[in-house]
Image (tube, helix red, strand yellow):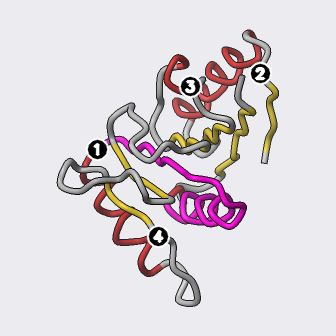
Amino acid sequence: MPIVEFVKLDKPEKAKHLCQLASEFYHQGKRVLIIVVDDNQALTLDRFMWTYDRHSFLPHVWDNGAVECHEEAIAIGTQQRNPNRAQVLIAASPCSPEFMRQFEHVIDFAETYDDTLRDAARKRYAQWQGVGCELRMR
């Protein structure tokens, strides 16, 4: 069962958090998979990862079917598959519990700035709590 960590967002700044979290786990020697809603978000995040911190580089790939992702430390995707054998899932888009269970660590978001998103996060939190996962808040 994974450790499930919810990151509280009071403002819509998810891209910044995605990069910071990916960097944190990468520097711990973990492979990371970031799941986003669609190709537009994947492309935006791919570009943002090149510029968000002028003093560091995060080796990453966009899993768009055009390149192999097996050796990359960080993969960005829209499909529920684990192309780089990641241990950490950062779910910027909701994923099925079955998919999420294959990871050691799952990051989810509690977007408190929007009532609908906040309520959806509460439901996901309750689901994880119901299956006995170790839950944390950031």
Closer to the chain start, of discs 3 and 1, is 1
Helix, strand or loop at disc 3?
A: helix
- Residue 60 image offset from top left, x and y in percent: 42, 64
- Near mark 4 (Cα within 10 A), the count class, few <14, some 14-19 or many ≥20, is some
Give, as a single range, the part of the protein colored magenta: 15-37
- Mark whose residue sits in front, 1 or 2: 2
- In the rendered image, the vertical position of residue 4 relative to residue 61, given as above or below: above
Q: On the rendered image, what quadrant is the N terminus found in?
A: top right
Q: Which residue is mark 2?
A: 133
- Three-letter amino acid code at disc 4? Pro
Instruction: Pick the residue in front: 76 or 113.
Output: 76
| Quarter of image, res 28 | bottom right
Point out the tag, 2 or 4, that comes first from the N-terminus: 4
Considering the numbered disc 2 on the image, is that residue within a helix, a strand or a loop?
Answer: loop
Label 2, label 4: how many angstroms apart (C-alpha)? 30 Å
Q: Earlier in the sequence, mark 3 or mark 4?
A: 4
| Crowd tier of the residue under label 1, counting other residues whose Cα lies within 10 Å: few below 14, some 14–19, many 20 or above | few
User: Residue 59 has which mark?
Assistant: 4
The residue lying at 56 percent from left, 41 percent from top is 89
Q: Position of residue 93 (x, y in %)?
A: 45, 38
Is 72 magenta? The answer is no
Under mark 2, the amino acid is: Cys
Real-space CA distance between mark 3 and mark 1, rounded to the nearest whole angstrom = 19 Å
Judge by depth and name the residue closer to the eye, 43 or 10: 43
The residue that mark 3 highlights is 120
Q: Where is residue 122, by image quadrant?
A: top right
Residue ID for mark 1: 38
Amino acid type at mark 1: Asp
Residue drawn where x is 68% and y is 39% of the image: 105
Q: How many marks?
A: 4
Considering only vertical position in the picture, is 74 above or below 132?
Answer: below
Q: For the residues labelled 3 and 2, say whether their Cβ atoms are less than 8 Å apart.
A: no
